[in-house]
Each structure stands twice: as structure tokens, then as C-alpha cells.
Amino acid sequence: MARVWRFGDSVNTDQIIPGRYNLTTDWAALGRACFVELRPDFTSGVRPGDVIVAGEDFGCGSSREHAVIALQAAGVGAVVAPSYARIFYRNAINRGLTLLECSDLGSLADGAEVELDRISGVLREASTGREWRARPLPEFAQRIARHGGVLELVQAHGGLRGECGPDCGSGLAPVPGGESDVR
Amino acid sequence: MGTLMEEIIAAHLGRSVVAGDTVVVPVDLVMSHDTTTPLVADQLARLGRGVKHPERAVVVLDHVTPAATVAAAQQHQRCREFVAGQRIGSLLSDGICHQVLPEHGLVAPGDIVVGADSHTVTLGALGALATGMGSTDIAVAYATGETWLRVPATIQVRLEGSLQPPVSAKDLVLELVRRLGSDGARYQAIEYTGPGAASLPMGDRMTLSNMAVEMGAKAGIFAADEVTLRWLDGRSDRPCRVVTARDPGYSRSEGISLTALEPMVAPPPAVDSARPVRELAGLAVDQVFIGTCTNGRLADLAVAATLLRGRQVAVRTVVVPASREVYLEALRAGYLESLVAAGVAVESPGCGPCLGRHKGVLGPGERAVTTMSRNFRGRMGDPSSEIYLVSPATAAATALRGCLTDPREVV
């Protein structure tokens, strides 16, 4: 069972990993620095698959992809928040970190035990049975997520344009309405 | 028909697009720097691909340069190996990426530019669609010459009137961030329009475009005009695709009178917290820093030098020119002599202490007044230190008095 780590609104990438700790591409070092100042007990307490539950605009600030790697290397299984800053959002999808966009997360407490169904995008609190259903990713992000990351997509199709239907060649079809307002 | 975003993307695709479309577009320039290039290189290696258009690629060493630690030196080594191995046309180390790219004529109006740095949006000042991305997106752009984008909706910011010095573009953008909020333009672009926008010199435009990302925006753009073409004259012989918005549909319109603004300060830890400097005047300060991609240009140094000439700073003060060009011009104009004589530490061009790695790191509990764009907790050093965001004039006035000072009191 995964546990919830609660964070507030506007958690920025400096807080996920301060700039003084990202002079490396070493996963273990980046993982050890995850939330090092914002929540010093995080790396010692986090268990593989635990879930970050945060407020609005998670991941704002710098473009540093080290933030996504730090979360992954620390063992984070998914991030759940009502909204994400756009660069962090792309970075997470590109690296295969699961993001769920859910509203009304206020009652979900720090330390709560939860189950996560990545396929259906449903988060379930064990003690109450309460469920949160994520808004679906935009179509292109879904395509990337299906491949497990954007490099995998590029590898599979020789570029970004594979698997894109009749409009392929001069851009992709518009994203149908009703999807998550992302990008 | 469309906003500048829609028109620029349409011009690259040869067909019209509207906000909300997802497109794959060719990019004119791809940039990464010393912190982000090593991850880019790792991802390209995983992909087993090289840089498709080395002539459209540029790597800049600016975040920790000259190297302050062995780790930083190793990052630079990896960057140089990457540039040599991929035969990348440009390796620059003469200043902050967002300043030196246009100085070297690498960015033209109508371009699509992607960079592995969030402040890549600065280049929107030149009429380019410029946006920041992470290292994997940039690796894909290097490998394929393309990127994918959702065509953003656009917020119009209509500027009226004219700035009344010492009120500056920084005060304007701090007020704008306060109004829109730090996520008020998320997934959208900001288009700066109106007579006030046309009146602004390139440096001021760069300050406004730069902080578009502090509102969550994908881009912050000005229509290229005579100011743009004059600035580019002698720097670039590339053909300019001057794109104009045609009957644009905006998601929101925000009007600001430049004439009515006053000096602003954004206290930590949020960028959208701006209030008039006079409300916090007298606040004790440990360090002043003038520089960065937001405010390290010649006009910014000129303001500081003019204010400090013949006087002494009352608190330790660091000035970092945004580029070697700015440094040289400030040297020739006598600004650097005025600053050094006033007791300022003038450092070599680059990002400087904005990332808390060198040239003015803050200790526990220390408070800095700076011309940076971010006041996130611990960004300049110890997590208990504080960053207040201001204009160059307010920073210089604060340096002079040793406490937060409205520049109208000292000019």
C-alpha cells in the first residue's frame, strides 16, 4: 500500500531539488536531495511507490528535469495534484512519471494509505474507500505515456510524427474537447 | 488570422492553426546550457541519435562559469565533449544564454526557439516564439529538428502611457505578475501590445518577456517592429520573418497604465506578492544583487552606476553583467568604474548568485534585495535566507542606504 505525502500549492522545482544539488546526473545523488530543505524527513521515510499529493501548480519555476529524476530516484510512484506547471508536466510525461490531475484533494491527509490504478487513473483511500478519478491526459501526452516516455515514442516511430492519423505530415489533429486543459 | 502564436506556428506549418490544436513543428534554434546539457546528452545517447541540425544548435556555459567547483568543471567538460562530438556550431561562454543568443544574431523575429531553461521565454522580446522545456524535450528537438506543442491561448497585456523613471519595466512586470498570479497564464502565452509596448526599448521588452514564465506562461511575446529591427541591425543577417497578429482572439485582456506605476517589491516566497516599495521601506538588508537574465543589461547597470556614482554602498553589493558585450559597454561608459569605486563587487558575466552556487551565496537568515525573477526560499543559499525582488533602481537605492529604499527618495 502506498502512502500519501502531502504538499501545498505552488511547490516549485527549487523545492523539489535545490539548484545547489543538481550539478550532477547521478540518480542516487539526485534522489537523496529530493525535498531536502522543504521536507527533510522525506528521503528517509519515503517507500517505493508512495504518492505525492499536492496543491495547484505543482512543479513551477525552473525547467530542471532533475526534479522529475529526483522524485523517481527517491521512489515516488506518482504525483496527484489539481494542476501542474507546464514544463514539469512535460518532463514527467516524457520520463514516464505518473501524474494524476485530480480536484478536491483537501481531505486526503498526510500519511494516508492509498491504492493507485495507473491504467484507469483512479486513486483510492484505503480507510474510507473514497476515490478520486483523474482527468484524462491530452491526446499527445497519452500517446507519450502509452510508450512509457517520449524517447520511446521517438524510437518506435523514428520521430514525433508516428501514429498520428490522417493529418500526419503537417501537424497533428486537434485535441478533442473535454480533455485535461494541459499544454 | 490569429494571435502571434497562431501566426508563427502557421507560418512554420504552411497551414492555419488555432489555440488548442496540437502540432509538431520544426524549430529554428535549440539551446541547452551547462546545467541541462549533460542530461540532454544522456537522453540523446539513450535514443542512439545525434543532433540533426548542428547549425541550429547552441550550447551556452553560463550557470556556473567560470567553474566554481570540480562538479561544475566536470559539467563544462561534458558540455564541451558533447559540442565537439555532435559538431554543434555554437559553444558560447560569454554571458547568460538568453542574452547572448540574440547578441550573436542567433534569434530572429518569427523563429520558433526551444531551450532547456525556463527563461528561454526572454527571446519573445524579439518577436520569436521561444519557450523553455526540460532536457528530454530538448534532446528530442536536437535529434529530430522538431518539437510538439499545444497551440496556446493568448492573454493580451495592453500597455498604455509611458514609464516615469525611476519606475521601470521590472516594476511593471512585478505588478503584472501580482495581477495575473504565479499560475495566471499557465498553458497560455502573453502578448504585450499597445502604445506602451511599442515605446519600450529591447532591454525592457526582454525583462517583460523573461518573467512571463513567472506567471506560468509558455511564451511572452512582442510583435517585432522598428525597435526590434534596429536592435538586430549589425547582429544578424538572417532574413526576418516579421509576423503580425491578424484579428487575434485573446482569452483575456489586461490593461496597465505605465504612467501610474510606482516602484514595486515582491517579498518571498512567492513572485506574485508584489507591493509598493514604500510600504516596506526601511527593511534591513544584508546583500544587494544586480544582474541576471531579468535585469543584467546595460540600461540596468547604467541606472545603478548613475545612482551610486561618487557615493559608497552601505551594504555588500554584487553586480553581474548579463554578457561580455554588456560588460564591455559598461566598462567603456564608465559605469563599472563608478560601481567599483562605490564599493560594489563586479563579477564576470553569467547567471551569478541567482542559483545560489557562487558569487554571493546567502548565509542563514540573511536577506537579499535583488533584480532576479524568483524569490523562492533558499534559491540564493541557505534555506532560511530571503530574496526580495526589485528593479535595478530600487536595488541601487537600497545598496546606498543599506535598507530597502524607494529610489524616488535618492535620485
Image (spheres, rainbow, N blue to C red):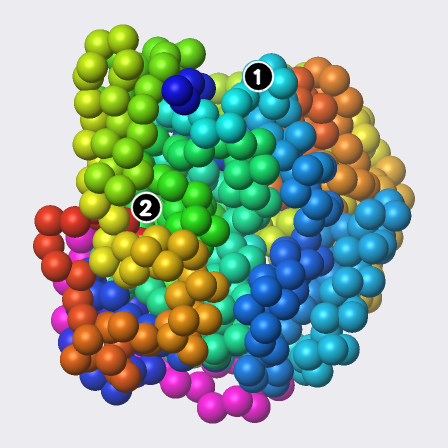
Magenta stretch: dominant secondary structure: loop
Q: Which mark is residue A34?
A: none
Left or right? Give the position of A165 relative to B288: left
Residue linked to disc 1: A45
Extreme residue in the front direction: A1
Q: Secondary structure at mark 2?
A: loop
Q: Is residue B230 magenta?
A: yes
Q: Quadrant of the C terminus of chain B?
A: top right
| Residue B164 horizontal/vertical position (percent) | 46, 47
In the image, residue B369 sits, relative to residue B24, either above or below, namely: above
Q: Nearer the viewer, residue A68 or B221?
A: A68
Residue linked to disc 2: B186
Amino acid found under the numbered disc labelled 1? Gly
Q: Secondary structure at mark 1?
A: helix
Q: Is residue B310 visible?
A: no
Q: Disc 1 sits on a residue from what chain? A: A
Instruction: Give the Cα separation between the discs numbered 2 and 1.
Output: 32 Å
Q: Which residues are magenta?
A: B228-251
| Residue A78 horizontal/vertical position (percent) | 40, 34
| Residue A77 horizontal/vertical position (percent) | 44, 33
Q: Residue at x 88, y 48 (%)?
A: B70
